[in-house]
Amino acid sequence: MRNMPTLATALLDGLKAHGAREVFGIPGDFVLPFFKVIEESKILPHFTLSHEPAVGFAADAAARYHGGIGVAVVTYGAGAFNLVNSLAGAYAERSPVVAIAGAPGVQERASGYLLHHQVRTVDTQLAVFKEFTCDQAVLTDPATAPDEIARVLRSARELSLPVYVEFPRDMVNVRVGRVPNLPRRAADPEALAECAEEILGRVASAASPVAVVDVEIRRYGIEEQVAKLARKLGLPVVTTFMGRGLMEQAGDVVAGTYLGAAGDPAITRLVEEADLVLLLGVILSDTNFALSNRALDPRRTIIAAGREVQVGHHVYRNLPLADLIAGLDTRVKRQRPRPHRVGQGIAYPRGLPVDDRPIVPSDVAAAINDLFDRHGKMPMTSDIGDCLFTAMEIDNTALAAPGYYAGMGFGVPAGIGVAAIGLRPLILVGDGAFQMTGWELGNCRRYGFDPIVVLFNNCSWEMLRVFQPESEFNNLDDWHFADIANSLGGFGERVTTRRELAAALDRAVARRGQFSLLEIMLPRGVTSDTLSRFVAGFKAARERMAKS
Ligand code: S1T
Ligand code: MG
């Protein structure tokens, strides 16, 4: 017994072995014993935040950036239900977050009392989490707990989706066996061979094929492999809206981001006039495809996502994307150079005039491009709002953003998650979203995080205004966010002119050891061109659908 780990240390060791690098959480009485082990065992570093939605966002963003799994530890009921929206977003956007919820002890469950934080039955919480996690384990039996943990962690990695672990508080120090490390299940070699040959045959006979990539290629850590394959095949690559920031190192093959009617016309033509579209790890969402002028024709589309590959009318199941890319790579016979029809690289705005004119959203993109030219790129996170559409005018740069689920409040806590893995992020956020989770910046000082926060303050829910200009409820008050930075342990300044913007960004890069909050004042009613085209296209698509 002495040599056996406790369930708490077995879980932490298992998490680490399966790719967790840190833990985010907020304690509560049902999870205090586990938190004690987290803190004292030092198996994984831990970071506490202020509100559970932020815990989920931070864990999600950390997983998106380091390619392992994210971990969110919360208490029963009040804590876990606060995690629902973040986990739902992680599920929608295919991010492997392990939600670990403390819970009533096995003995308490049988007491007959309603326990505090309990909603209906003890298992109401499990039932809710089943909707947006791909696997669950309730650790009530020491004999099976290690295997159950191994199974859910493998599911999280294989499917790149959230999982749920419920940890009764009286099980924390129970002695158990170690959590086995289950190997990933690879593709059936025959199915892989047949699938790869079929795809390569299609590509060889296509005149103008294109690859569209989305977040799964990052989730499975294969961005470089996709770039290499694209070079061999002479395939131009575009990212989806959700996939913006992918393959930032592969500027030679990535032509830009496909936004349909809202995007660069050359990129739109590249996709819509292609005679073969290879969708790699793509979420088939409205934000990615609703603005298509031409619907994706199954006969000229190959889609590999969610461990499934569809080529025309053939479906290959249980075929992981990483195996497919490797299988294609080894079978490409010879390179077939194709004439590139797009000039590499879209001309993103840069060279911001340093003058005393007021700032518009595209100026922020130009200022950030200039900043990256001077100081090097920074990893970015963004909230939903015009800041994310403005990000489409920043050079293709590593980005975590809720481009599909579109949940507000992601940007700041996601940036904290990125800081926790040792990077210095640039965070883009609107004033409405900042009202939701901006307070979390107050946690930067104790961990020594120094993100740069670029806050688009238009005193408005501007994106909603674009949809419905007549509504006055979209007017927000002026909260003077920069003024709160000091009391939260950071540095804040408000900028209103282009000269001030460029100078403030430079100062922020130089300021280390505390967060910098740049509150950029933007006029109401002014948006990036990309947002206005996007909303116009979205409304038109909805109207088309209503008519048909
Ligand atoms: N609540 C949550 C959690 N997520 C949402 N996306 C919404 C509500 C609806 C919503 C938007 S865009 C938007 C809201 C309220 C306004 C965003 O305001 P702000 O952050 O200031 O950015 P900007 O002024 O640039 O629009 C969407 C699309 O669903
Ligand atoms: Mg706003």
Image (tube, rainbow, N blue to C red):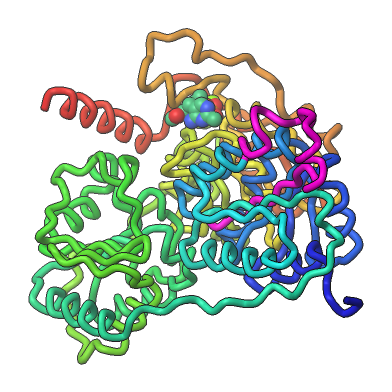
Q: Residue at x 27, y 48 (%)?
A: 264
Whether 166 is drawn above or below 357: the answer is: below
259 w.r.t. 20: above or below: above
Q: Nearer the viewer, residue 112 or 54?
A: 112
Count of marks, rendered view:
0
Image location (x, y in percent) of residue 257: 34, 53
Counting from the top left corner in percent of width and height, residue 228 is at 36, 80
The quadrant in which the C terminus is found is: top left
Which residue is painted at 43% across and 58% down in the image?
215
Q: Magenta segment: does it hold 104?
A: yes
Q: Which x, y percent locates residue 393? A: 42, 47
Residue 504 can be seen, yes or no: no
Q: Residue at x 44, y 58 (%)?
A: 396
Q: Quadrant of residue 285?
A: top left
Q: In this orientation, does residue 62 appear?
A: yes
Give the quadrant of residue 120: top right
Camera-nearest residue between 117 and 428 = 117
Give the magenta-colored segment's residue range: 96-125
Residue at 50% x, 76% y is 184
Is 520 one of the magenta-colored residues? no
In the rendered view, tell whether residue 147 sits above or below residue 56. below
Against 195, residue 365 (above or below) is above
Residue 356 is left or right of residue 202, and the answer is right
Residue 25 vs residue 326: left or right?
right
Quadrant (top left/top right/bottom left/bottom right) for the N terminus: bottom right
Most foreground residue, 236 or 222: 222
**Horizontal and vertical percent position of residue 154:** 55, 68
Task: Work out whether residue 92 or residue 343 is closer to the camera in this orientation and state it.
Answer: 92
